[in-house]
Image (cartoon, helix red, strand yellow):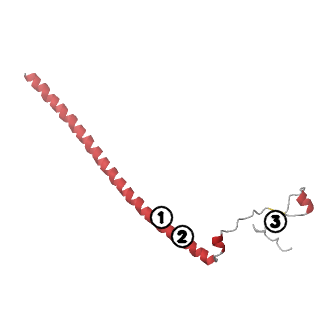
Amino acid sequence: PGAPAPVDTPNTAAKTAVAGTPAAASGTPVSTATPREPPSIEYQTLTVEQILNKFQKQLEEDSLAFVEEAKRVCEYDAILRDGQRDLARLTSEAQRLMLEQDQLEQTLQGIGAFQHELE
């Protein structure tokens, strides 16, 4: 048994054309690798360590900004929940007062009917 065939990497991938095509007939490999854009000039002048440090710094800044925004959202959420609780309490109080008003009106109608009978 011979050695296993080498594995093509994306940068050097060269696939042999399908049999019956002109490239296959000529024995010319067909490359399927797509050309990549070079990194921005900003990253071309930095070492890998500098790039990683830059990414780490940006990640830390973004995480701090996220935490601050999360705190602000939490504060707004607390305000909204307090408002919702106040509205629920006011709604319950209004319903209770409406029931008491109905009972009072019924009582007054009863008293009015009793007075009418007395006259």
Question: Which amino acid is tagged 1?
Answer: Phe
Element type at mark 2: helix
| Secondary structure beneath label 3 | strand
Q: How many marks?
A: 3
Residue found 57% across the figure and 71% down from its top: 55
How far separated are the C-alphas under marks 1 and 2?
12 Å
Task: Mark 1 and mark 3 in contact? Answer it, CB < 8 Å.
Answer: no
| Left or right: 11 in relation to 119 | right
Q: Earlier in the sequence, mark 1 or mark 3?
A: 3
- Residue 99 percent coordinates (x, y): 24, 38
Q: Residues within 10 Å of mark 2 (few under 14, many from 20)?
A: few
Q: Is residue 20 above or below residue 51?
A: above
Rendered image: mark on residue 58: 2
Q: Quadrant of residue 52?
A: bottom right
Q: Residue at x 61, y 78 (%)?
A: 49
Report which residue position mark 1 lands on.
Answer: 66
Q: Amino acid at mark 3?
A: Ala
Q: What residue occupies the far left of the structure in this picture?
A: 119
Query: Is residue 37 shown above or below 95?
Result: below
Q: In the drawing, does residue 108 fall left or right of residue 39?
A: left
First of labels 1, 2 by sequence position = 2
Point out residue 78 in the picture as x, y percentages from the top left corner: 36, 57
Of labels 1 and 3, the one closer to you? 1
- Which mark is drawn over residue 14? 3
Disc 1 element: helix
